[in-house]
Image: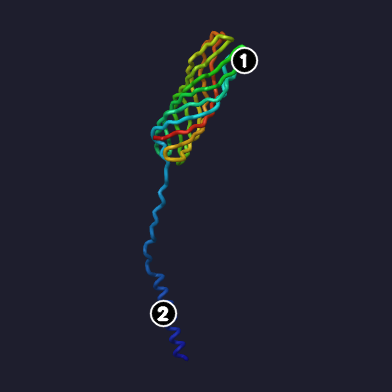
Amino acid sequence: MKRSIMAFAAATVAVVSGAALAADLPRGPSPYYAPAPVSTYNWGGAYAGLNLGYQWGKVSNSSINPSGIFGGGQLGYNWQNGQFVFGGETDIQLSSADDTFAPYKFSNPWFGTLRARIGYAMNNILFFGTGGLAYGDVKGEFNALTETKTEVGWTLGAGMEVGFTPNWSAKVEYLYMDLGERAFSVTGANNGLSSSLLRFGVNYHF
């Protein structure tokens, strides 16, 4: 019986000593797991698209407020540096905006812009500000008399664009446009058009 106890004690000491030695041995290097690659949307390059929106206007020196649906197309180019995106865009629009204050009527048959854009990209979401040149026709009518002036002014706005495939994006944009003033014979005054523009559009990136 005494020999069995001594043998068990010796075996226990051997096991504990072996475990202690194993704990003291240097460990091998931990396995390395490479991080998953981060996908970054590319905003650089040329693009073209279409847009549709609504226009609220005001003719200076009158009580006439032309409003209506407008739509057209745009062309642009972006340069991207990190998360910052710089570019230029031009667009041309046909508009149904008009208003009548008898016996006068004013309308804005078409307009266009030439703008710079600067934005901040969060992967496929781009927030941007924009501003530049605006131009277009302002048409005045008095009974059977019609007079049209091409006016030049400025525009300023901001928007957001979302890329939903590598080549396609959608945007929402607000612009304030001021076409300045010119003398109209039908009113005997200087009249110009300022408008708020809200539009939605899609772009194809080449």
Q: Where is residue 57 in the image (x, y as percent from the top left)?
A: 56, 21
Q: Position of residue 22 (x, y in %)?
A: 40, 72
Of residues 59 and 111, which is closer to you in this image?
111
Q: Where is residue 26 in the image (x, y as percent from the top left)?
A: 37, 67
Query: Image height check: is 52 above or below 105?
Result: below
Which numbered marker is on residue 101?
A: 1
What residue would you read off at disc 2? 14
Q: Which amino acid does label 1 sit on?
A: Phe
Query: Image height check: is 109 above or below 41?
Result: above
Which numbered marker is on residue 2?
A: none
* Colour scheme employed for the rendering of this structure: rainbow
How many numbered marks does the figure carry? Answer: 2
Looking at the rendered structure, the secondary structure element under dot 2 is: helix
159 to the left or right of 86 = right
Query: Image height check: is 20 above or below 156?
Result: below
- Residue at 39% x, 37% y: name it: 81
- Residue at 56% x, 23% y: name it: 68
- Furthest residue to the bottom? 1
Q: What residue type is labelled 2?
A: Ala
